[in-house]
Image: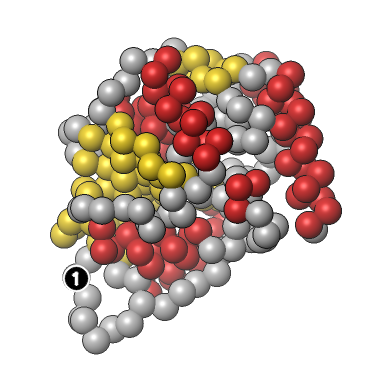
Amino acid sequence: MSGFFRGYYRYTAFLNRLSPTTKVDGHVIKVLPSVCKPLGNEQVLAEYVPADKNVLEIGCGSGIITLFLADKSAQVTAVDISADAVDNTRMNLAANAIENVTVVLGNAFEKVDGRFDVVASNPPWVDFELGDPLRMWASSSTLIPSLFRESRRFLVDDGLLVISCPGHAQEKLVEMGRANGFELLEAHAREKRKTVGVRLMTLAYLQVGFHPLVYVFKKVARPEAEQPRDGGVM
């Protein structure tokens, strides 16, 4: 598996160099070689985040979701472990004249302060650790459990955790949410109609077969004696 993923990341970096920009719902997005290229309607996640809120995004990548969150939010704090991703997000924010976003270099919640109305994330879906967190935008066995385990500390009462994951993961996500004080409010298909060009690019990047959903979880009260339990990635 490690050989496959190292090869895959080199391959996608090559593709990003060949085609470094993409246009998504009116936003022109530049993507650096080491960053995930948005091809799967990632921006749809922002539609399920209430307007005029203080939002924390974990794993901002190219900044595609960040841009759409910023369009409707009072303030956005966007975090990524990769310095390239942080630079990429800042680049796209500047190109789109967006100013209500703070971008932070850090591992998930480690550099985060304050309380938020919403925690949002499009985390890696593949349950595999390559050993290099700076080259793992497609695979991780730790980030999804961390989102459920850590988000409660940073969310206001009744705050929301909005994440995008494959449809087949719903049962596991509900179980993880229940174990960490969240209830699933709704789940929606993330798919939108793609142009022929985007469809071909999606095939080239091997981003097929996931059928992602956007899951909206709500932080709920729970007895203090009840300890959170970790769960695995799908």
Residue 57 appears in which quarter of the rendering?
A: top left
Q: Position of residue 74 (x, y in %)?
A: 19, 32
Closer to us: 133 or 119: 133
Quadrant for the C terminus, please: bottom right
Residue 128 appears in which quarter of the rendering?
A: bottom right
**How does the figure colour the protein chain or chains?**
secondary structure
Closer to us: 216 or 20: 20
Q: Position of residue 99 (x, y in %)?
A: 28, 23
Q: How many marks?
A: 1
Query: What residue is shown at x 26% (from left), y 28% (from top)?
Result: 100
Query: What residue is shown at x 39% (from left), y 23% (from top)?
Result: 93
Q: Is the residue 234 above or below the residue 37 in the image? A: below
Query: What residue is shown at x 83% (from left), y 53% (from top)?
Result: 3
Is residue 119 shown left or right of residue 18? Answer: left
Quadrant for the N terminus, please: bottom right
Q: Position of residue 225 (x, y in %)?
A: 24, 86
Q: Is the residue 154 above or below the residue 194 in the image? A: below
Q: Is the residue 103 above or below the residue 39 in the image? A: below
Query: What residue is shown at x 21% (from left), y 48% (from top)?
Result: 117
Residue 94, can we see it?
A: yes
Q: Position of residue 131 (x, y in %)?
A: 67, 59
Which element is circle 1 on?
loop
Closer to us: 71 or 171: 71
Instruction: Tell me the residue that label 1 is attached to.
Output: 221
Q: Residues within 10 Å of mark 1 (few under 14, many from 20)?
A: few
Is residue 33 shown left or right of residue 77? Answer: right
Residue 110 appears in which quarter of the rendering?
A: bottom left
What amino acid is labelled 1 in the image?
Ala
Residue 51, can we see it?
A: no
